[in-house]
Image (cartoon, coloured by chain):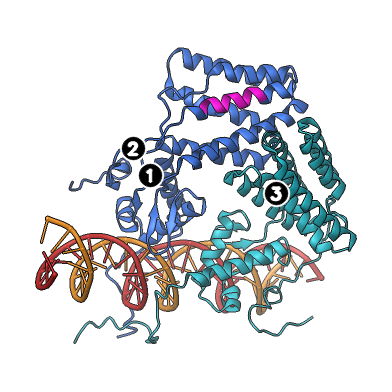
Chain colours: A blue, B cyan, C orange, D red
Amino acid sequence: MATQRRRNGKTNGKRAGKANPAEDEAVYQAILHALLEGKLKAGVKLAEPPLADIFGVSRERIRKVLHRLGAERRLEMIPNRGARVPRPTLDDIRSVYEAHRVLEAGVLTQLVRLVDDALIEKLTAHLTEERAAATRGDRAASVRLSGAFHVHLVEALGNAELTRFLADLLSRSSVMVSVYEPATDSICAVDEHGAIVEALRARDVARAIAVSREHFLHVESRLHLDDDPVPASEDLTDVFGAIKPKRRKR
Amino acid sequence: MATQRRRNGKTNGKRAGKANPAEDEAVYQAILHALLEGKLKAGVKLAEPPLADIFGVSRERIRKVLHRLGAERRLEMIPNRGARVPRPTLDDIRSVYEAHRVLEAGVLTQLVRLVDDALIEKLTAHLTEERAAATRGDRAASVRLSGAFHVHLVEALGNAELTRFLADLLSRSSVMVSVYEPATDSICAVDEHGAIVEALRARDVARAIAVSREHFLHVESRLHLDDDPVPASEDLTDVFGAIKPKRRKR
DNA sequence: CGCGCGAAAAATGTGCACATTTTTTGGAGG
DNA sequence: CCTCCAAAAAATGTGCACATTTTTCGCGCG
């Protein structure tokens, strides 16, 4: 009889302790991506069992990822009540934009001390790219490059802490636009970016900050409250449908 | 007869699913506190079994807390190899100080637009406290109040994102001083804080930033590399001795 | 027709028994 | 005395079986 503590239904060769860090990461990236992409609408409940089913992994795996996202404040975790996509208030998003504005003021202040020809050249090249995307009407590229401009600015300082903070702010604002979707043309006006570079070239801190400030206020002013932002498809399978080819009811 | 799903030996009344969120928090706070306090030296390994034993909780509980601290970048998590107290390089800490410096430049830029009598009064009151602590030689209070001054500045903006970022930076630098311990008198000179308030009162952005910048560079210059910063007591029981009444040697 | 209210169903939280690694240990050989 | 290497010991990672909520559902009553 041996120890009758044997078995459970699954007698596969692979059991516990599989150690597959890539799988965790895949699930994490999938959910994060859906979140950043705006596919997961605000207020949607992320229950563990369905997600485990969709991704074909154990519930523990899902649980770990969900809690990690909660620690990053990308999901709202309520004890005993699971995870939800946070529903940021208008003040929340204003806070994020304002933080970016204040941060960039500091960045520019420091940047005028370090600016050299190489930096100006790099930024100018970026502006060219931005203008090209704008003139050919490539909205997706425009949005991406517009954010990248500010990333370039902070990266020029070479400070990991500041770069990380900015990346965090940007990822947050990208989520929020899906709730309080700005006017369809919420892309940073290239001229304003160009004006910032101009001020930098001239080592004019005050002007650089003034332009940057106006730039942000301009973007912020376009935010508006969207009262009923689509009931959001409560079916998670729709959102992650591309991951696992699974067909189910409706 | 019946389901022969007998299972393990423990048939106590209280088993799984105890649901005690406060206990998690207690362990988290205890470890975080030890980290911030500098009791946990850089490079020390935090193994799960001993911690579970010390705190009298299950290993899973410890595991969860450790991973959470890892997600916050307060511990260095290496797959299959556990958690260690990070050993920041000199560049790392410079990066934190520089980030604070850059951030404060942005904060001051925005602050001169909002400054009013109430704020000046509040800051002045704080300066009085700081000076009092300094004159009576209360080092602990001086360090605390010195950090609090910068917190007051950013809090005056009322921006949650910025406040959180600053708190993060401060908690990080407080950990680092235990590695690269600055000169014994690394406290911010009160005069410099006073000068910042003066510049604010005068609505002089340029001066405020200049003073703040000098202030930080002054502090940064005092950092020095501590080659062999004490072997650090590898015994975790010593560090968390206060939690469980366990005999400690010495 | 709505409104409790209790029971069933579903979801979350936790300890535990392993699987899998990593680290330590104890010699044998150079 | 040092180096290498295999086996033991220790530590980390994971699925699973529950316990404990929370949510949903059904139904009688006002």
Label 2 amino acid?
Pro
Name the one closer to the observer, B33 or A27: B33
Instruction: Give the percent coordinates (x, y) of residue D16.
Output: 33, 69
Residue under pointer 2: A229
Subunit ID for the residue under disc 1? A
**Residue most extreme to the top:** A135
Magenta span of residues:
A210-219
Precedes in sequence: disc 1 or disc 2: 1
Mark number for residue B152? 3
On screen, residue B233 versus residue B226, left or right, reads: left
Residue under pointer 1: A42
Subunit ID for the residue under disc 2? A
Q: CA distance from mark 1 to mark 2?
A: 9 Å
The secondary structure that dominates the magenta segment is helix
Label 3 amino acid?
His
Q: Of the residues tagged 3 and 2, which is closer to the observer?
A: 3
Q: Is residue A42 above or below residue B31?
A: above
Q: Is residue B80 visible?
A: no
Please rate how many residues cluster around mark 1, counting C-alpha atoms within 10 Å: few if below 14, some from 14 to 19, many from 20. many
Label 1 amino acid?
Ala
Asked if the residues shown at circle 3 and circle 2 are in contact, with their CB atoms under 8 angstroms apart, the answer is: no
Name the one closer to the observer, A59 or A42: A42
Instruction: Give the percent coordinates (x, y) of residue A51.
Output: 33, 53
**Pointer 1 and pointer 3 on the same chain:** no
Q: Secondary structure at mark 1?
A: loop
Instruction: Give the percent coordinates (x, y) of residue B230.
Output: 81, 65
Name the one closer to the observer, B184 or D13: B184
Asked if the residues shown at circle 1 and circle 2 are in contact, with their CB atoms under 8 angstroms apart, the answer is: yes
Q: Is residue B127 visible?
A: yes
On screen, residue B124 versus residue A170, left or right, reads: right
On screen, residue B150 versus residue A192, left or right, reads: right
